[in-house]
Image (tube, rainbow, N blue to C red):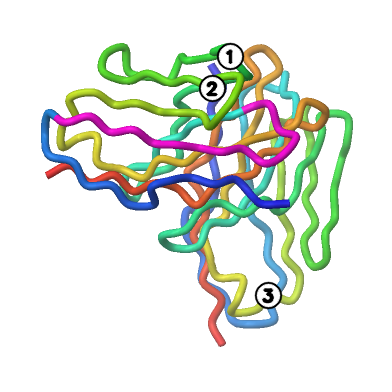
């Protein structure tokens, strides 16, 4: 059973470009969570999704950020018009419905130049 | 609003010592609590999950306890080894919103 997969592992974007981060949950997991970790800081919750539904997006910036988890395919975190402050490691986690135990992917490190 | 605090922020111990990491949370209406380790530049590895109805969980040299009434969880590591060196994070899933709130972590260094 493959673990949570994230790609790309490293992403470099110039200011103003768009960044798309992908997360494939573990098999049998229908819940996906996205977190952001700034250097030397803790993990900050961004959004919690189930298939085709956003359950809680209270940690998402109101502008430029969006997330989806379609019926088929990976979850996508999209950042439009990136700025230097978006540089961070973005982690996704997935869980099953019964225990909600989270399993994390290796993260995508976004660098905005 | 749920807040999660971990003390100490950093800890350095000689190999072989038993040690305790602390996690405090302000809202006792939690669904579960999960402990993780994070190695530098890597993702998080799940160590233990404690459901709100449980008092403790054990896995190998690790034991985690949960006291909801006092808003505390402890992670006990027995006979520490240099390979245990990492940042340890606790995360609380709140019963009302179902999202996880992370503590800021304890950076552990076990000296050979």
- Residue at 55%, 22% in the rendered image: A48
Residue that mark 2 sits on: A69
Q: Is residue B49 left or right of residue A81?
A: right
> Is B26 on the left or on the right of A62, as rendered?
right
Label 1 sits on a secondary structure element that is loop
Q: Quadrant of the C terminus of chain A?
A: top left
Residue range in magenta is A17-31
Q: How many marks?
A: 3
Q: Residue at the spot x=53%, y=32% of the render?
A: A74
Classify residue B47 as left or right of residue A14.
Answer: right
Q: Residue placed at 16% from the left, 31% from the top?
A: A17
For disc 2, the chain is A
Task: Kindly identify the residue that appears in the image at 44 percent across and 36 percent down.
Answer: A22
Pointer 3 residue: B80
Density class for disc 2 (Cα within 10 Å; few <14, some 14-19, many ≥20) is many
Image mark 3: chain: B
The residue at which mark 1 appears reads as A52
Residue A65 - label: none
As for residue B72 lying within the magenta part, the answer is: no
């Amino acid at each position: 059973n493959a673990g949570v997969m994230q790609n790309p592992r490293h992403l470099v974007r110039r200011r103003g470009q768009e960044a798309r981060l992908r997360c494939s949950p573990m098999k049998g997991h229908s819940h996906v969570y996205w977190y952001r970790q700034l250097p030397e800081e803790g993990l900050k919750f961004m959004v919690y999704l189930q298939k085709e539904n956003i359950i809680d997006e209270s940690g998402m910036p109101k502008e430029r950020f969006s997330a989806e988890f379609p019926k088929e395919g990976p979850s996508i975190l999209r950042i439009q018009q990136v700025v230097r402050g978006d540089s961070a490691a973005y982690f996704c986690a997935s869980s099953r419905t019964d225990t909600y135990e989270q399993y994390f992917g290796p993260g995508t490190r976004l660098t905005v130049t | 609003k749920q807040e999660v605090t971990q003390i100490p922020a950093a800890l350095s111990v000689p190999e072989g010592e038993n040690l305790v990491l602390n996690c405090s949370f302000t809202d006792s209406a939690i669904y579960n609590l999960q402990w993780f380790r994070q190695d530098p530049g890597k993702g998080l590895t799940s160590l233990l999950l404690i459901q709100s109805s449980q008092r403790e969980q054990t896995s190998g040299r690790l034991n985690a306890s949960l006291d909801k009434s006092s808003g505390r969880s402890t992670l006990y590591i027995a006979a520490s080894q240099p390979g245990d060196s990492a940042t340890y994070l606790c995360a609380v899933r709140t019963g009302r919103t179902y999202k996880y709130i992370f503590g800021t972590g304890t950076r552990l260094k076990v000296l050979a």
